[in-house]
Image (cartoon, rainbow, N blue to C red):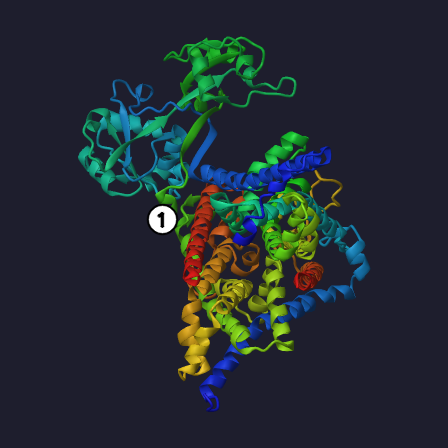
């Protein structure tokens, strides 16, 4: 390198200056600029990929249409359900990760016989425990009317747990995971930290059916929350301003009698902000409103919680642990075999036919595509050896896949151990085996370690080989024949079942972080190797 | 050291030999079992029909097994990938061997290593979510998926292979050649493309062929971005299914002859790969000889 370094600078260019040489110099400049550009482009491509995935993986940013506007009420007036009753406040256990909920969701949480799950609303796999207090006369009756429709009274009775007093309600909600209860506003003044208030979104944009008619093949399906606000404040004069029909907006005032509903039904282009309950009762047309939802995607919860409902709820803790097990056992199986193979090839085998066959075997094995390994694993380990689709079949298949990586790097590492080490050891009377174990292997160990890290990286990223050898169960690996998912497989399953792009990205971000870490450690080890051998 | 080898030494040597043989045995097993599982289809379907018929209807009655669309799919995405990755790969390889210095060289080296380390599902996800919308907008294609998107993703994936082997081959060019050229008054660039590249051509070619093997064998990334349509690809924007995708997709539900036909697809893929491997090994050997 250093010997050619001085020659790299063609100083003679300055001496010759004919038109021909100018052309050559121009050529040189263009070629070199192009090469520089492509080198920078390569870095940009990687930055794009990693950056894109990390941004998408870390934060979610969605617009989700709902039947109700994003406006959440913490104190709900019960005027429609009883005269002169106090406002109601809904409270939940503080570890439930919901801030507010559409009123229809609240009703479902109270009414379903089948245990309802918070997961439907916040992806937290947590059973809902609805609590109620019936002893507060008119207030209790009004709340019951608010959260019930007439026909699910039986479900309610089966599902809901009774408490003895408002104090008891606060204590129970604060101590029961997934609890949901309610209080009159006056009791909800100084709530303990174990309880938090759940907002309820119950305002809907009801419109005259004409607003959502199909005109010229287009229809207004939903509006943004900003548009909803502008509509409600009267800033929008015509529906076409929010992407709808060309007709003026008539904003109808809400009245306590049924007057406003009639007016809405009879006025073309009319809209009314009203409670979702009224909409349901009277069968009004609703204009869905998109809520802008954003937040952290890759959270601590996502890392530590167990996956549920095909990965739609909970986190990826089991998946991470399964990945770790796959890595561990692959390394345990492949390292001894790979290193011993390398030792044989470097220390024992003589150049010749055997060596040629061994080398060709390793190289061919390295070139076989992952899906062919998958096919082989499926016939051989799963079917012929009868190990079934599961952990052991996939570990053995992946072991074969990473073997060439370990053999090659170990070979290089062993070859780089100076011959004088071996000769010195042999001269001191050690046997060949003693020399290998006590002298050569320790000297080659950093290089071998690099190979193991590379194999880990390969194992983490493999997917095609695992689809038909590891299966798709998202539980924790429980034994050699248990089907499981690892990160890459989980990512693919989430992707192909189109369950949740947010979770796909979060899983992808975890995968990228793991790959970055393995690469960094491989580089670190390699640097140490070159330093050591440099001395 | 004159004493004869102890029993221990001999046993251990045998164990080492057995370990070394595992990879050879694996290759043999893989070959044998893929052929054993896949070849019985040829008793029912003419191999010629299997390879050159474009009708794939394994669940129809009578079932038809023609994998030409998948062979063409693999060819399309691989050629597309190489068209994109070879110029960039060569340029960056030349850059790393001849032009890069200091910190920038270190960064570029880490970048190439990372590109090689990123899992294929990540490339697939990225292609689906970031590249396909671009293709959709630029070329007005309905889904943005297909041959072109798959080629771009595969090009990025094969880049590290081509870069690394180009760099290694250029570095292996004897110094005398380079110095001689410079001494004769050739500029650095002229030396690179008139002297160094020609003398490293076998190695560079081996890198390209190796990249081709990677592209043909890749499954997950293409599965996520190529559209997976059982039709003959007609152009860069049409949907495609490759050999690998055919295996991965149909294995989910295939039974009987259909399942066998997937192993037969595996045979075709395997033969392609073996052929490519042989070419690579031949070129590598040639490269070593040329350098001496």
Q: Is residue A200 visible?
A: yes
Q: Quadrant of residue A61?
A: top left
Toward the bottom, the furthest residue is: B3
Give residue A271's position: percent from left, percent from top. Answer: 48, 14
Query: Is residue A482 among what the camera can see?
Result: no
Q: Residue at x 45, y 44 (%)?
A: A509
Q: Secondary structure at mark 1?
A: helix
Pointer 1: what residue?
A: A304
Residue B43 sits in quarter: bottom right
In this image, B163 relative to B68: left or right?
left
**Residue A90 at what x, y percent from top left?**
29, 30
| Closest to the observer, A22 or B162 | A22
Vertical order, A144 against B240 (above or below): above
Q: Read off the chain for label 1.
A: A
Rendering coords of residue B186 (x, y %): 67, 45
Camera-side residue: A251 or B194? B194
Towards the viewer: A535 or B141 = A535
Identify the residue at image location x=50%, y=16%. A207
């Amino acid at each position: 390198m250093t010997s050619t370094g001085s020659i790299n600078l063609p100083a003679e260019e300055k001496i010759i200056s004919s038109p021909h040489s100018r052309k050559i110099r121009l050529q040189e400049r263009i070629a070199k600029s192009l090469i520089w550009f492509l080198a920078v482009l390569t870095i940009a491509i990687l930055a794009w990929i990693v950056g894109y995935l990390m941004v998408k993986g870390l934060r979610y940013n969605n617009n989700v249409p709902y039947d109700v506007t994003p406006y959440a009420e913490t104190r709900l007036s019960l005027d429609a359900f009883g005269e002169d009753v106090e406002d109601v406040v809904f409270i939940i256990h503080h570890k439930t990760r919901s801030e507010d909920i559409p009123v229809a969701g609240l009703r479902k949480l109270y009414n379903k016989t089948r245990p309802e799950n918070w997961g439907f609303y916040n992806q937290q796999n947590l059973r809902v425990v609805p609590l109620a207090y019936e002893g507060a006369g008119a207030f209790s009756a009004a709340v019951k009317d608010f959260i019930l429709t007439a026909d699910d009274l039986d479900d309610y009775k089966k599902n809901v747990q009774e408490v003895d007093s408002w104090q008891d309600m606060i204590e129970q909600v604060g101590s029961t995971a997934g609890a949901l209860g309610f209080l009159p506003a006056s009791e909800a003044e100084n709530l303990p930290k174990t309880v938090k208030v759940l907002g309820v979104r119950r305002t809907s944009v009801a419109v005259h059916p004409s607003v959502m008619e199909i005109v010229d093949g287009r229809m207004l399906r939903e509006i943004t929350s900003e548009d909803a606000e502008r509509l409600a404040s009267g800033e929008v004069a015509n529906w076409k301003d929010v992407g709808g029909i060309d007709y003026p907006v008539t904003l109808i005032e809400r009245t306590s009698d049924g007057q406003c509903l009639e007016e809405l039904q009879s006025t073309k282009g009319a809209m009314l902000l009203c409670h979702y309950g009224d909409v349901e009762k009277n069968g009004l047309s609703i204009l869905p409103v998109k809520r802008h939802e954003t937040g952290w995607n890759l959270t601590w919860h996502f890392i530590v919680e167990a996956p549920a409902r095909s990965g739609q709820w909970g986190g990826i803790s089991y998946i991470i642990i399964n990945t770790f097990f796959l890595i561990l056992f692959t390394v345990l199986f492949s390292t001894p075999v790979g290193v011993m193979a390398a030792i044989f090839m470097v220390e024992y085998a003589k150049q010749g036919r055997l060596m040629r066959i061994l080398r060709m075997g390793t190289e061919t094995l390295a070139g076989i595509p992952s899906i062919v390994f998958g096919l082989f694993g499926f016939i051989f380990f799963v079917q012929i050896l009868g190990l079934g689709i599961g952990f052991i079949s996939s570990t053995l298949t992946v072991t074969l896949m990473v073997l060439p990586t370990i053999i090659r790097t170990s070979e290089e590492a062993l070859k780089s151990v100076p011959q004088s080490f071996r000769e010195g050891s042999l001269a001191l009377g050690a046997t060949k085996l003693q020399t290998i174990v006590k002298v050569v292997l320790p000297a080659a160990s950093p290089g071998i370690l690099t190979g193991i890290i590379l194999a880990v990286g390969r194992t983490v990223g493999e997917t095609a080989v695992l689809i038909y050898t590891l299966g798709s169960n998202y539980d924790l690996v429980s034994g050699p024949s248990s089907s499981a998912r690892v990160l890459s497989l989980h990512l693919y399953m989430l992707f192909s079942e189109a369950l949740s792009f947010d979770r796909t990205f979060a899983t992808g971000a975890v995968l990228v972080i793991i790959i970055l870490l393995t690469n960094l450690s491989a580089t670190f080890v390699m640097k140490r190797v070159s330093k050591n051998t440099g001395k | 050291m004159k004493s004869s080898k102890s029993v221990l030494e001999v046993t251990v040597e045998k164990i080492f030999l057995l370990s070394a043989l595992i990879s050879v045995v694996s290759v043999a097993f893989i070959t044998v079992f893929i052929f054993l599982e896949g070849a019985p289809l040829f008793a029912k379907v003419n191999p010629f029909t299997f390879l050159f018929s474009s009708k794939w209807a394994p669940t129809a009655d009578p079932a038809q097994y023609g994998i030409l669309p998948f062979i063409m799919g693999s060819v399309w995405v691989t050629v597309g990938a190489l068209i994109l990755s070879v110029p960039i790969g060569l340029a960056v390889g030349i850059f790393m061997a001849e032009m890069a210095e200091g910190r920038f060289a270190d960064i570029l080296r880490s970048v190439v290593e990372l590109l090689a380390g990123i899992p294929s599902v990540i490339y697939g996800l990225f292609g689906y979510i970031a590249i396909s919308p671009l293709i959709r907008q630029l070329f007005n294609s309905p889904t943005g998926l297909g041959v072109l998107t798959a080629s771009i993703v595969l090009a990025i994936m094969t880049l590290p292979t081509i870069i690394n082997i180009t760099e290694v081959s250029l570095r292996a060019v004897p110094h005398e050649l380079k110095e001689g050229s410079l001494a004769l008054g050739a500029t650095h660039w002229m030396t690179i493309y008139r002297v160094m590249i020609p003398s490293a051509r076998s190695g560079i070619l081996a890198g390209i062929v190796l990249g081709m093997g990677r592209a043909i064998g890749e499954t997950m990334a293409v599965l996520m971005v190529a559209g997976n349509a059982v039709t003959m690809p007609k152009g860069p924007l049409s949907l495609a299914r490759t050999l690998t995708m055919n295996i991965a997709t149909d294995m989910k539900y295939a039974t009987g002859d259909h399942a066998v036909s997937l192993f037969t697809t595996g045979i075709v893929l395997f033969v392609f790969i073996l052929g490519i491997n042989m070419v690579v090994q031949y070129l590598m050997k040639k490269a070593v000889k040329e350098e001496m």
